[in-house]
Image (cartoon, rainbow, N blue to C red):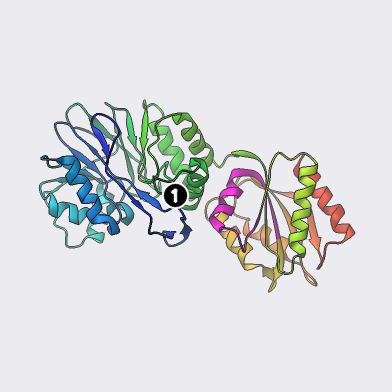
Amino acid sequence: MIKLTDDIFYIGVDDRQLDLFEGQYDVPNGMAYNSYIIFDDKTAVFDTVDGNFTDEWLDNITEVLADRTPDYLVVQHMEPDHSANIAEFMKQYPGTVIMGNSKTFAMMKAFFPGLALEGRTLEVKDGDTLSLGSHELKFIFAPMVHWPEVMFTYDSKDKVLFSADAFGKFGALDTDEDWACEARRYYFGIVGKYGAQVQAVLKKTAALDIQMICPLHGPVLLENLGYYLDLYNTWSSYGVESEGVFIAYTSVYGNTKNAAELLRDKLLEKGCPKVAIADLAREDMAESVEDAFRYGKLVLATTTYNADIFPFMKHFILDLTERNYQNRTIGIIENGSWAPTAARVIKGMFEKSKNITFTDTTVTVKSAVSDENVAQIEALADEILK
């Protein structure tokens, strides 16, 4: 339990048991499942937590409530890491009214087919308000950020935005780490496809006086909120966050790796402000996706493989395109001992992507890096830095 304001408390939990979030994202520092409570004439609880932490969460509520009972359970997001304990909560507090929207309750019936909802719900529409006494809540729908039922809640008294999964990050609350790195990896892994929808809800909240952001994952944001809002605006508009180049490569016998590293060295020699490089077979794929969106220029270096491209590179490009990768310049280094086709395959995979510019220079390695390839890599570096 953490006191955030005179009336608002954090009642969430840290998960240090988890190795993969959503079954795919490596979380070496665990996860936080956040839940909050507002005390006023009426008391409102915001979201539940993952099903592995039922007892700990209910104990947190019991401790903070003392002799009170909650009047409302506000359900902002039905993903099970936030909604798993709705039925258990209602067993303990049967008089509580569940608040959500029409999509919330449709999902609730699917997740909890035995839960009796009649007479126990209050359906809200976009822009509706609810008075708890001195705290007035405004509900702001945020569809597809990143599920269709998602909504934010704004408390006008303490100027707090409860932002569902937006502004969340990987990592338990007791982890001392940079916010942006794990928030960026979280955003592009989980929300990145829905940039237009994030932009829409950012416009809805732009006029609000926000002094605190309370997400469902990661720390409560209290200071320098413009920094977080600006990053979300850049990420969701597919803008360039950092000037530099990201080189992503796959290599079977080391020759494509040699070409990628030579390009890195040339770019740095020529004054490129930042060059990040990753072996897609060995680096965390989500971190590579994060870097591809972070920088304005991307170089893909890979071998031809079964008349296609190497599987890790194919996986990587699919991760980018399904997240609406756009507004970027891409250079290609291909390798093929007898029939190099990687460049053609790569360009085909980006055919439906918006505002992708391929460099005029394509480096074609036939087995090992030749003197001709060195000259091509020099030309590619010059073109990228124009």
Magenta stretch: includes residue 293: yes
Say which amino acid is labelled 1. Phe
Query: For this rendering, which residue is in front, 362 or 18?
Result: 18
In the picture provided, is 218 more to the left or to the right than 378?
left
The relative height of residue 214 versus residue 317 in the rendered view (above or below) is: above
Query: Is residue 79 in view from this perspective?
Result: no
Which x, y percent locates residue 331? 72, 51
In the picture provided, is 145 more to the left or to the right than 304?
left
Residue at 39% across / 33% down in the picture? 204
In the picture provided, is 362 more to the left or to the right than 87?
right
Name the image quarter holding residue 16: bottom left
Magenta stretch: includes residue 79: no
Name the image quarter holding residue 301: bottom right
Looking at the rendering, the stretch of residues picked out in magenta corresponds to 278-301
The quadrant of the picture occupied by the N terminus is: top left
Residue at 26% across / 37% down in the picture? 9
Which x, y percent locates residue 262? 79, 53
Query: Is residue 176 in view from this perspective?
Result: yes
Q: Mark 1 — residue?
A: 170
Which x, y percent locates residue 47? 27, 46
The relative height of residue 374 versus residue 382 in the rendered view (above or below) is: below
Q: How crowded is mark 1: few (under 14 residues within 10 Å), some or many (20 or more)?
A: many
Which x, y percent locates residue 323? 52, 52
The quadrant of the picture occupied by the C terminus is: top right
Dot 1 falls on a residue whose secondary structure is: loop
Name the image quarter holding residue 278: bottom right
Residue at 25% across / 60% down in the picture? 110
Residue at 25% across / 48% down in the picture? 102
